[in-house]
Image (tube, helix red, strand yellow):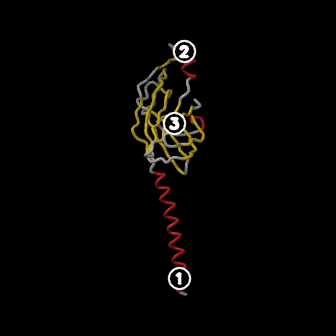
Amino acid sequence: MKFLNLTRSLLALSLLGVITACSSENAIVGNVKVSDVVTSDCKTSVSKTDTRPEYLTDFYSTKTTLSLLMRNDNTVAAQFLDVMDNCAIGQLNVDMTCVENKIIIILYPDRDMLTNCVCMYDMNFKIRNLFPGNYQLEIFQTTTNKQTSSSNRIYHGTVTLDSNKPVRLTMTR
């Protein structure tokens, strides 16, 4: 009888250890944070009312890119180039979640205003506490409400982050 109670106690202790190990791993993934967000001023702008048609075509054919570089300290240096948005947005912001190797990044402006011009911006930021590995990545460009849908998704794919190996992704719009 003592042996049976000892076995049950050891089994319960082992299960508790497994549950604790799993939850601590999820806590580490949940600690991923974005910091040091810096948006450039408007690099170039166009307006349908006063821009030559051929320049408009060239401007709108430019694709946004995202460069990622995983550092040895589990920090990713990230840079969006040529993000198109309204000329009166103020700054671009970024929110991010990472759950079970799925990363969702949301780009959104400080404010929404209707204008007749579009600017190109660059944006730098850091992602902290992200470990090297393979991730499913979705990127959305939204308004200030941060509502995501397939219509404002600008990237969907897999990315492999390895220390000191740069990755460059091209957005779909």
What is the quadrant of the C terminus in the image?
A: top right
**22 or 70, which lies in front?**
70
Q: Which residue was labeled with disc 2?
A: 55
- The percent coordinates of residue 17 (x first, y second) are 50, 67
* Location of residue 35 (image quadrant): top left
Residue wearing tag 1:
5
| In the image: residue 159, left or right of residue 90 | right
| Vertical placement of residue 130 versus 54, above or below | below
- Seen at 56% across and 42% down, the residue is 160
Q: Which residue is mark 3?
A: 166
- Please, what secondary structure does the residue beneath circle 2 have? helix
What type is the residue that disc 3 sits on? Answer: Pro
Q: What's the distance in space between the residues labelled 2 and 1, CA to CA?
A: 80 Å
Between marks 3 and 1 in the image, the one whose residue lies nearer the viewer: 3
Whole-angstrom CA distance, mark 3 to mark 1, is: 55 Å
Sequence-earlier tag: 2 or 3: 2
User: Which residue occupies 43% across, 39% down?
Assistant: 126
Residues at circles 2 and 1 in contact by the CB criterion of under 8 Å: no
Mark 2 or mark 1, earlier in chain: 1
How packed mark 2 is, by other alpha carbons closer than 10 Å (few <14, some 14-19, many 20 or more), is few
Q: Amino acid at mark 2?
A: Tyr
